[in-house]
Image: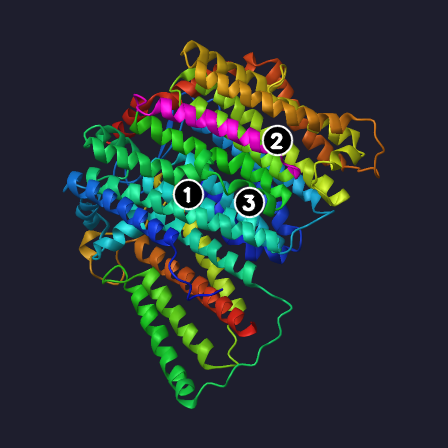
């Protein structure tokens, strides 16, 4: 099986939707979910892969576009396709309570979002990455504005404007790279990037940083995030936090490791990440809207990931993989449950957690929150521990201190929320979940607990994936070796 | 909002800062650029004759970088979907538009078939002469725009266009998948593309077919976009 199917099938589905609509109201929804289940199964079948797989399109690299499926990218592909599948399954039951208008179009956007997130991870051609950058961006703008109320439209326009500015920087960087190196292939660019004049190297790095910086939601460039989260509907926030930002993070650091293998700006980026985490957690303390609160908490976790990936250290990257896994799942749980709460109690105010009457949902949410905090025996702990350990070994005590202070602030509001959930108060009407939704949420929570109590099950794979991601030389050899 | 407000100090300083930044960037670019000659683009153009297509640019756009073109089609597809979704307003009343004058109406009727024919020509001959699917599709959409603005009771054949659009999108991906099945690369050129046929209408294997598909897709998406934007203007 070829890795191109991860992109071709969702696109094919998106184009097919007008035909599938003829099958009735459920046709599109079921077909989309079935296809995503197939993709998730396909992604897991690649886990045993011994050698990285190179998929050529039309003409061999470095001239043509090609896809690389190695241990690092297969982790992200599997994560995205399985989370998208779980999201679709959850929505199949959620739509009995609340369904979107023009549902067929909603499923088109879900699948273009999936195709582009996977494309960003797999592609090794920088212009092709730009195309996926745009598809992901446009799908996300429309999903943000989907509900068409004033807040959603405002958020959509804000997202569109910042996204377009990011595209300009990125396309300028690609133009400069092409003028000077004469290629769009990442491996060839990586090989020749050293030879460029110093000023130009700095300029290209800066433009790439600005282009991706908006999308990876790093500190000075993340002013738009909380508004977008507040405006868009709660279910969709789960996708943004679990899939979209993770795809951009991967591609940003993938390019960074290739272009600057010796870590020229790594100290700057580590402290920027740590600062990003600190600022987000300080702002999160004051939030009274749960959607905004979780958005800032997402920003904090992304800052931590940013610092960890910037370290050019395989142990830290291993920890980052754990955090990616744990945070994606935990935020998916939180936003999915929040959408149920919002539907039932018509509020996303922080005080609603005192009134909800849903012991099961509350318990699952508690696990997710504690995992984000990094409480032992949950997946988030393993990630945070590995990152802080390698920071200590590398002597980065300043960044470590900032991250610890930020975690302390994080614990202030998450413990407050846990308190609200467990308080013995006058509770509202009972919120009952569908059995399938309960099973899906428990499955996600179980993943967090399993990865946290028995990290040795996945530690080998994570270590290997981290090494593969950091190893620019064998990536270049794989692609350029295909020519001879 | 008062459009005539005076330039504030912040506007001027912002503008000055932006210009300094842009000038610095251009200075760095001009002083340091290597302007390499042996670029991938030149290499692709040199290789393009192997596919038996007279227009080398078409070979690069549709074949060597065909996956980017598929991505662009997807971008156009979701952009059109988004415009339809955001601007759609079921409560809007059918607004009364001023009747266009006789000359415009007659000219539009006469011109539309010619514009359509010209668009199809540009599309079909994309592998032989300058032009191709994107250009041809936009020309057809401009013809639709002419009909829409000239006549009050012109209704786009929505069903037909939706069928064409769906067909085009599906067959693009299917051609790619057949290439994957037969030649082991997505979008592989599995039809005969002998170099001796270069310059003929039937040459280049799948390349002209894909470009026609692109044309159909672009034409229908652009027509939808134009129609959505125009109707929105009427209601407000």
At x 46%, y 53%, the residue is: B170
The tag on residue A133 is 1
Q: Is residue A103 magenta?
A: no
At x 70%, y 40%, the residue is: A349
The subunit carrying tag 1 is: A
Q: Is residue A58 above or below residue B134?
A: above
Tell me which segment is drawn in magenta.
A261-290
The subunit carrying tag 3 is: A
Residue A149 location in percent, x, y?
62, 55
Quarter of image, res A51: top left
Q: Is residue A274 magenta?
A: yes
The tag on residue A285 is 2
User: Could you say whether the residue bearing mark 2 is in a helix, strand or loop?
Assistant: helix
- Which residue of the protein is positioned furthest toward the bottom in this rendering? B102
Q: Are marks 2 and 3 in contact (CB under 8 Å)?
A: no
Q: Is residue A442 above or below residue B119?
A: above
Badge 3, how many Cα within 10 Å: few under 14, some, many 20+?
many
Tag nearer the camera, 3 or 1: 3
Identify the mark nearer the N-term, 1 or 2.
1
Tag nearer the camera, 2 or 3: 2
User: Could you say whether the residue bearing mark 3 is in a helix, strand or loop?
Assistant: helix
Q: CA distance from mark 3 to mark 1?
A: 18 Å
User: Could you say whether the residue bearing mark 1 is in a helix, strand or loop?
Assistant: helix
């Amino acid at each position: 099986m070829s890795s191109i199917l991860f992109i071709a099938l969702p696109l094919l589905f998106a184009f097919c939707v007008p035909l599938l609509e003829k099958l009735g109201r459920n046709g599109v929804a079921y077909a989309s979910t079935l296809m995503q289940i197939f993709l998730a199964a396909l992604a897991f079948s690649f886990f045993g892969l011994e050698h990285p797989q190179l998929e050529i399109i039309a003409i061999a690299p470095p001239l043509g576009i090609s896809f690389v499926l190695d241990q690092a990218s297969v982790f992200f592909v599997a994560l995205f396709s399985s989370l998208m599948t779980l999201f679709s399954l959850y929505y199949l039951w959620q739509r009995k309570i609340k369904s979107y208008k023009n549902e067929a179009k909603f499923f088109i956007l879900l699948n273009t979002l999936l195709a582009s997130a996977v494309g960003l991870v797999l592609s090794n051609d920088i212009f092709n990455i730009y195309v996926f950058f745009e598809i992901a961006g446009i799908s996300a703008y429309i999903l943000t504005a989907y509900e068409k109320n004033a807040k959603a439209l405002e958020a959509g326009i804000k997202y569109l404007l910042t996204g377009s500015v990011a595209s300009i920087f990125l396309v300028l960087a690609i133009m400069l790279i092409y003028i000077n190196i004469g290629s769009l292939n990442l491996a060839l660019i990586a090989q020749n990037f050293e030879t460029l004049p110093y000023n130009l190297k700095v300029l290209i790095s800066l433009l790439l940083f600005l282009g991706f910086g908006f999308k990876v939601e790093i500190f000075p460039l993340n002013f738009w995030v909380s508004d977008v989260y507040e405006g868009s509907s709660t279910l969709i926030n789960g996708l943004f936090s679990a899939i979209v930002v993770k795809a951009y993070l991967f591609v940003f650091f993938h390019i960074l490791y290739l272009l600057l293998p010796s870590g020229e700006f790594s100290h700057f980026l580590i402290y920027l990440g740590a600062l990003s985490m600190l600022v987000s957690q300080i702002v999160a303390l004051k939030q009274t809207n749960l959607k905004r609160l979780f958005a800032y908490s997402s920003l904090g976790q992304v800052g931590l990931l940013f610092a960890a990936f910037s370290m050019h250290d395989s142990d830290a990257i291993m920890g980052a993989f754990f955090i990616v896994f744990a945070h994606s799942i935990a935020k998916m749980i939180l936003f999915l449950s929040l959408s149920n709460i919002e539907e039932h109690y018509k509020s996303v105010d922080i005080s609603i957690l005192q009134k909800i009457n849903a012991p099961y949902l509350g318990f699952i949410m508690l696990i997710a929150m504690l995992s984000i905090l990094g409480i032992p025996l949950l997946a988030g702990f393993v990630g945070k521990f590995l990152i802080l350990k390698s920071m200590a070994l590398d002597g980065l005590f300043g960044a470590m201190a900032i991250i610890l202070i930020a975690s302390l602030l994080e614990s202030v509001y998450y413990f407050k929320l846990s308190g609200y959930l467990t308080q013995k108060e006058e509770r509202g009407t009972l919120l009952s979940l569908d059995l399938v939704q309960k099973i899906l949420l428990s499955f996600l929570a179980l993943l967090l607990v399993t990865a946290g109590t028995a990290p040795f099950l996945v530690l080998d794979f994570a270590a290997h994936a981290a090494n593969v991601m950091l190893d620019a030389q064998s990536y270049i050899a794989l692609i350029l070796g295909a020519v001879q | 909002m008062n459009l005539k407000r005076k330039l504030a100090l912040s506007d001027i300083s912002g503008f000055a800062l932006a210009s300094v930044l842009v000038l610095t960037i251009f200075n760095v670019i001009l002083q340091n650029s290597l302007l390499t000659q042996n670029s991938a683009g030149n290499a692709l153009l040199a290789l393009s004759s192997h596919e038996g297509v007279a227009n080398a640019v078409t070979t690069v756009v549709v074949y060597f970088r065909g996956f980017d073109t598929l991505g662009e089609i997807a971008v156009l597809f979701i952009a059109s979907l988004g415009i339809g979704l955001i601007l759609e307003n079921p409560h809007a009343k059918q607004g009364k538009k001023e009747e266009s004058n006789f000359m415009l109406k007659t000219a539009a009727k006469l011109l539309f078939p010619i514009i359509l024919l010209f668009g199809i020509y540009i599309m079909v001959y994309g592998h032989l002469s300058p032009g191709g699917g994107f250009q041809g599709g936009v020309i057809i959409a401009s013809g639709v725009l002419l009909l829409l603005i000239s006549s009050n009771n012109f209704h786009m054949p929505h069903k037909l266009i939706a069928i064409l659009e769906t067909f085009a999108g599906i067959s693009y991906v299917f051609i790619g998948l057949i290439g994957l099945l037969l030649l082991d690369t997505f979008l592989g050129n599995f039809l005969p593309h002998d170099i001796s046929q270069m310059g003929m209408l039937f040459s280049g294997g799948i390349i002209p077919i894909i470009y026609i598909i692109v044309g159909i897709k672009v034409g229908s998406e652009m027509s939808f976009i134009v129609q959505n934007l125009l109707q929105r203007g009427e209601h407000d």
